[in-house]
Amino acid sequence: MAQSDTVEGVEGLAQDWSSDREAFRDVPWGKGMMWIFLLSDTFIFTTFLTGYMTVRLSATAPWPVPSEVFALTLFGESIPLILIAIMTFVLITSSGTMALAVNYGYRRDKRKTFWLMIATATLGAMFVGMQIFEWSKLISEGVRPWGNPMGAAQFGASFFMITGFHGLHVSIGVIYLLVVAFKVKRGDYDNRGYEIVEITGLYWHFVDLVWVFIFAFFYLW
Amino acid sequence: MAYADQDTGHHAGPDKFIWKYVWSQDHKVIAVQYGCTAIAVGILALVLSWLMRMQIGFPGSLEFIDPSAYYQYVTMHGMIMVIYLLTAFFLGGFGNYLIPLMCGARDMVFPFLNMLSYWFYLLSVLILLASYFVPGGPTGAGWTLYPPQSILQGTPGTDWGIILMLASLAVFIIAFTMGGLNYITTVLQARCRGLTLMRMPLTIWSIITATVLGLLAFPALFVSAIMLMFDRVLGTSFFMPYIVHMGQALETGGGSPVLFQHLFWFFGHPEVYIVALPAFGLVSDILSTHARKNIFGYRMMVWAILAIGGISFIVWAHHMYVSGMNLYLGYFFATTTLIIAIPTAIKVYNWTLTLWHGNIHLNTPMLFSIGFISTFLIGGLTGLFLGNVAVDIPLSDTYFVVAHFHMVMAIAPIMVVFAAIYHWYPKITGRMYNETLGVIHFWVTFVGTYLIYFPMHYLGFEGMPRRYYAYEGYEFISESAHSLNEFISVVAILVGVLQILFIINMLMSLKTGKLAGANPWNATTLEWQTPQTPPAHGNWGDELPVVYRWAYDYSVPGADEDFIPQNQPGELGDGREVGDDTGHSSGEGAPA
Ligand code: HEM
Ligand SMILES: [Cu+2]
């Protein structure tokens, strides 16, 4: 193994792929599987966003202006997209704490890993909480999947569907994080290694990344 | 993690019947569960095709077939055949059985997930069948489920049928994803020593390529199912344009029905290859084994599989030439469609050249494989017709299309399903099937296929439309067309009933077939080299096999026998030292 360790670039890639046993060297099964799953999930979100963009173009009624719909009145002033900005900030911060958790996981610092994962999960839960707030606000203003007072019915339909599906991902991620965090604390991975923290992290970063696209295509367009 | 990563050490496996055969995590048991469930629903779909043929050949002879019932038969027949029979059988059945065995692994990498995959599949089948027991019955929207008609009143099954259909598809996709992730990870990361990618049997190459297609194409179906479900249940308008329905303007509107068609066919065309690619791979290995010759152009075959897989994602709109699409788009999709014929043709040439000067054993698997080449070729050629916009527009939605897709993606893969079942039956059960019955089954099916589908091309040219409940009283449909339809129906029902030969053969041989031994076909691939037949839990006894050569060392000059198993060391044929051309085969265990 020693000499092939050093081969890099295209040649190294070719060597890995033409090797026996493993096409991706030293990639644990769980991690490989998570990558493939995320690839598939990418197609799901891409399809959601493509569908949303198509109906936005096909809709005959005017599309509601996102910066007005998603404005919040704070201290007597209406600030566009303020809630979404905070939500995005929270989610991106959670990616940071997750990355730290992965790092401490590999250093086998169980206590720090545990608390950083808990912090990540808390930020995730905050995100979901704010989403619930946003949903209830819109619902109270009369936005429904099948129609809304501001314009094209497809607005509400796409909004609830896409943020709902993403919120579901975040919620599942929070549960996943909590389960893994408590197993870390219990020392379940002392023998098996701490890749699982990284695998959880992959999922979590993916969910964040998707949010960036939703943010760009839904709220900023 | 799973025990599958252990190089040595014997794992006894569970003893209790229920853990061994019902809630089993053994890939071989799961494969058989998948296969049997698929055959069971397949029989339902077959019976539905008889009912349709009765109505087409002998209109009104069965009183319970009213227009609604007819459309429900069409829909359920098409959907079951494509998704719940063929997809499930090739990937869940053969994929599960062959991947770990051919890769020299003890099992899939995550057996528990694999087991869940089957149970979710079963659940999806049950949800689908439940639609027969709800008010209004199953949906009659056609297997393409195009909105708006699929969710408007007037189409059978709009109350419950369509909801159950969409739910069932979503569950199926979840099941497929759990299995598919396993298949790919197993092939990429859990092969045995010496088994490089370019030594893998084509079966494995084609099954994982099909799985990748599935993982990237099913999302489009999943999302469109969710959106259609919203349109139906919540009254959203993703796919609903402004419609005046029975004199009343509907409240929905502003959506894009063509969006659904794009999403559906972005899934639908790769789906054709999800079914066809595994058939390609299996047939390659069967042909090579029974012709005692190496597969012609192995590398070319691998690249052709990958090329077909890739191109299949950019041809989808050839199903939509009549949907009102930009002409230049039609031009693009016609071009890609014709391009995909090139790697496909390469494969057909290579199969033929594999047979050339081979020592052909005309047993049942071989006969069915040749039957596959024949039907696939005919279906592929009519595909070239339909790929061209100008030819497709008059032929679209006629029986020419029905003939085309049945030849290429219904009958051809079914031929391979039969070939592969006969071929691997001795390994799965430990006993031989009855050869005489098998050969009769082949001739009945093969001749029957041509008698059923060949005349349909002619009917299509005459303009006989598909998905019609009644064909009487149209001037352009001639008298001879009606008598042809009678003929087709009689043959279809006869051939369908005679499939009982296959069932009888399979069931009887379980008891009375003569013992097969480990390697009745003198085949080279790893699954034939297991210490026990049928392979025990864990597949390989105490030690994992080591591979020294590719899968096609047949009739090697100078060898003692006319085949050299993949796990036999030596200089002859493709044999090389393990590690000669490999990056890191020096033997650290797989990471746990
Ligand atoms: C015994 C063999 C079979 C017979 C006699 C048969 C017969 C039929 C008939 C009569 C139709 C309806 C055509 C129409 O009215 O438009 C049909 C449709 C269809 N069949 Fe088959 N079929 C058979 C096997 C298969 C298999 C193995 C597949 C697997 C792919 C398949 C896939 C389809 C599909 C996708 C449709 C279209 C359904 C639709 O229009 O929504 N069939 N078949
Ligand atoms: Cu197609």
Image (cartoon, coloured by chain):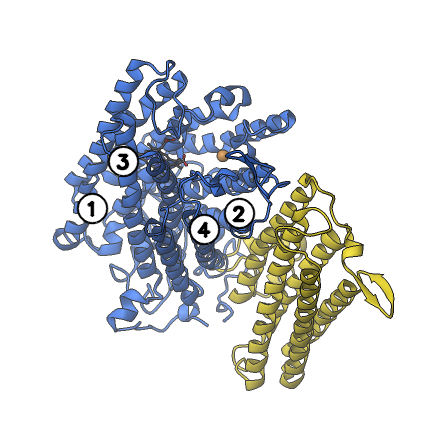
- Badge number at residue B163: 4
Q: Which residue is mark 2?
A: B228
Q: Nearer the viewer, mark 3 or mark 1?
A: 3
Asked if marks 2 and 1 fall on the same chain, the answer is: yes
Tell me which numbered mark, 2 or 4, is placed earlier along the sequence: 4
Tell me, yes or no, whether the two marked residues, 4 and 3, touch with CB atoms within 8 Å: no
What whole-number distance in Å separates the C-alpha atoms at marks 2 and 3?
29 Å
Task: Tell which subunit mark 4 falls on.
Answer: B
Which amino acid is tagged 4? Ile
The quarter holding residue B347 reads top left
Q: Alpha-carbon neighbours of circle 2 within 10 Å: few (<14), some, or many (≥20)?
A: many
Q: Colour of chain B?
A: blue
Q: Which residue is mark 1?
A: B503
- Badge number at residue B51: 3
Task: Tell which subunit mark 1 falls on.
Answer: B
Q: Image check: B358 left or right of A23?
A: left
Q: Position of residue B64 (x, y in %)?
A: 26, 37
The quarter holding residue B329 reads top right
